[in-house]
Image: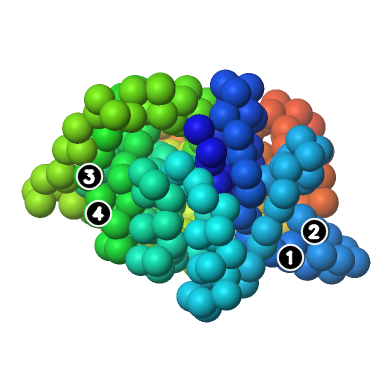
């Protein structure tokens, strides 16, 4: 099929690779424009742009798709379908209507649960025991379109957003190829009105750990925000990013160090399994404690 691919971050790259490997003709790749990054604040292309260029594909990164000229350029590609995965721009109706089979979105949740920007983070933070991927026929609403294909997967008790992200990316890549192979036979299934939740974009203000919450909540926060933006706490004036955790037995005042990297919560305790000091690489709890004295409490 003639495909327009629309995606930007790491999550989208395996999907692009799989479409190319399956023999589809990717006539153009749309992604977000390069953004200033790093110490020098030089414009850095997105992961999808870098991969598309390495594959020799045409890359386009318009700031908006609302203008008539951009919409005409999109339509001129005469695509059979557009595959959209974590692109980052709202698609106007003219864009949704341009490909013969419309635009298909790969969404990392079991719709209608966790529509919106951060479905993987929110699923873990909420304590969901399973999630999945939906292939959705896009329409004007936010992730409201009918579902063509879906697949479920359990969320591991110590799984982080980073780990789940990678699994769902591979699942989405496999599922979209299956959907394209069977497209004429698939029946769009409207989303139910019950069970709608919204996965709001992660606010960095959410990332500081509140040790007065239960161990289950703290563990989910740490795992849900790992690796980005990373939950954190203050250890003797040093901001430590917490990247892995499990709820354990233990009791004490919230923030009290119970031994090793186990911290008392409002109910129970959390054992931190991976952490990161400023300017350093992520380390296991055993490694980081060789050079970091927790003291009696953390805040």
Q: Secondary structure at mark 4?
A: loop
Front position among marks 2 and 3: 3
Mark nearer the N terminus (4 vs 1): 1
Which residue is located at x 22 percent, y 44 percent? 146
Q: Are marks 2 and 1 in contact (CB under 8 Å)?
A: yes
Which residue is located at x 17 percent, y 38 percent? 189
Dot 4 corresponds to which residue? Answer: 144
Which residue is located at x 82 percent, y 51 percent? 279
Dot 3 corresponds to which residue? Answer: 146
Which residue is located at x 62 percent, y 72 percent? 63
Mark nearer the N terminus (1 vs 3): 1
Q: Please provide percent x and percent y for residue 234.
A: 62, 57
When asked about the image quadrant of residue 283, the answer is top right
Q: Are marks 4 and 2 in contact (CB under 8 Å)?
A: no
Dot 2 corresponds to which residue? Answer: 44
For label 3, count other residues whose C-alpha is less than 10 Å away and answer few (under 14), some (14-19) or many (20+): many
Q: CA distance from mark 2 to mark 3?
A: 35 Å
Q: Please provide percent x and percent y for residue 183.
A: 33, 29
Q: Please provide percent x and percent y for residue 295.
A: 65, 47
Q: Are marks 4 and 1 in contact (CB under 8 Å)?
A: no
* Label placed on residue 35: 1
Mark nearer the N terminus (2 vs 1): 1
């Amino acid at each position: 099929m003639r495909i327009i691919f629309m995606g930007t971050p790491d999550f989208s790259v395996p999907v692009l690779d799989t479409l190319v490997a399956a023999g589809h003709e990717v006539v153009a790749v749309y992604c977000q424009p390069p953004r200033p990054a790093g110490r020098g604040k030089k414009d850095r292309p997105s992961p999808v742009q870098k991969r598309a260029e390495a594959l020799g594909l045409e890359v386009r990164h318009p700031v908006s798709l609302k203008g008539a000229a951009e919409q005409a350029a999109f339509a001129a590609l005469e695509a059979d379908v557009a595959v959209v995965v974590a692109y980052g721009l709202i698609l106007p109706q003219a864009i949704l209507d341009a490909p013969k089979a419309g635009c298909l979105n790969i969404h990392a949740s079991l719709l209608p649960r966790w529509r919106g920007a951060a479905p993987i983070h929110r699923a873990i933070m909420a304590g969901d025991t399973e999630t999945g991927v939906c292939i959705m026929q896009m329409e004007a609403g936010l992730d409201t379109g009918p579902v063509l294909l879906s697949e479920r997967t359990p969320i591991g008790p110590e799984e982080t957003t980073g780990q789940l992200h990678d699994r769902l990316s591979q699942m989405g890549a496999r599922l979209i190829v299956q959907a394209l192979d069977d497209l004429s036979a698939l029946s769009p299934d409207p989303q139910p009105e019950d069970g709608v939740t919204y996965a709001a974009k992660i606010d960095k203000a959410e990332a500081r750990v509140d040790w007065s919450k239960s161990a289950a909540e703290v563990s989910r926060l740490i795992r849900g925000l790992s690796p980005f933006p990373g939950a954190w706490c203050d250890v003797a004036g040093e901001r430590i990013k917490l990247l892995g955790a499990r709820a354990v037995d233990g009791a004490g005042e919230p923030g009290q160090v119970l031994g090793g990297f186990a911290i008392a919560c409002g109910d129970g305790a959390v054992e931190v399994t991976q952490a990161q000091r400023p300017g350093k690489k992520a380390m296991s709890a055993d490694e980081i404690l060789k050079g970091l004295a927790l003291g009696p409490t953390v805040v």
